[in-house]
Amino acid sequence: MSACIPIILDPRYKYDFLEFLLSDFGSEKEAETWMGEVKDNMQKLFNEYNKDVESQRDSGTQEAEDDNDPLAEWDQYMKSKRQQSSNELDQYLKEQLTPRKEKVDMLHWWKTKSEIYPVLSKIARDVLAIPASTVPSESAFSTGGRVISDYRSSLAPTTVESLICLQDWFKAADARKNE
């Protein structure tokens, strides 16, 4: 389910792409159930982040009131206006999709939209800043059992052989030092 969050946060796809993909798999009922779970998880994530953002806004408003800020009433007005407007997640999802072929730097897109979607932009910053990897974490730090294949490497066979020999030589040199 969490792998769907970046797709939802991509303004070219949102829920629509997931629904499209699900239309080819399983029954319609299974697709609806799965999509319902995805939407519930996204809403829970949004609500959790919204609590944090609201508490930060409240503490900011408190500080402004403590300092006899002449714009403290403005802050209160904007807070009540935000609460009256519909959920930010709903607004984002209702917004028209960005054309699919348009190149989008998603972190930059969310940064520019942070005034409109403060909660979602914070989610996007946290979720999208984590690079995806096809390498399992245990194999990233261990060479045991790792196989070099055409899929995994574009190195020439002689280069791979040289690197493996070099690694063996370093291990042997370290073993001699530790004796």
Image (spheres, rainbow, N blue to C red):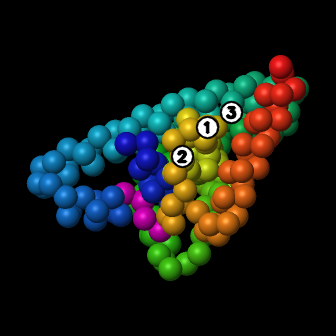
Looking at marks 3 and 1 on the same chain, the residue that comes earlier in the sequence is marked by 3
Q: Is residue 89 left or right of residue 64?
A: left
Identify the secondary structure beneath mark 1.
loop
Identify residue type, mark 3.
Arg
- Which residue, given by chain and number where applicable, does mark 3 sit on? 57
- Tell me if residue 64 can be seen: no
Real-space Cα separation, disc 3 to disc 1, in angstroms: 46 Å
* Depth check, front residue: 96 or 83: 96
Q: Element type at marker 2?
A: loop
Amino acid identity at mark 1: Ser
**Looking at the rendering, in which quadrant would you find the N terminus?**
top left
Indicate left or right for 43 with 133 as reference. left
Residue matched to label 2: 146
Quickly name the residue at label 1: 142
Based on the displayed image, in which of its 4 quarters is residue 156 positioned?
A: bottom right
Region of the chain picked out in magenta, as a range? 11-15
Disc sitting over residue 126 in the figure: none
**Residue ID at (34%, 44%):** 38
- Between 23 and 117, the one lying in front of the other is 23
The front one of 117 and 74 is 117
**Crowdedness near tag 3: few (<14), some (14–19) or many (≥20) residues, C-alpha within 10 Å:** some
Badge 2 or badge 3: first in the primary sequence: 3
Estimate the x, y position of residue 140 in percent, counting from the top left: 61, 42
Question: In what quadrant of the picture does the C terminus appear?
Answer: top right
Contact, mark 1 vs mark 2 (Cβ under 8 Å): yes
Name the mark nearer the viewer: 2 or 3. Answer: 2
Q: Residue at x 43, y 65 (%)?
A: 13
Examine the rendered structure and indicate whether residue 18 appears above or below residue 5.
Answer: below
Q: Pinpoint residue 7: horizontal percent, then vertical percent.
A: 45, 57
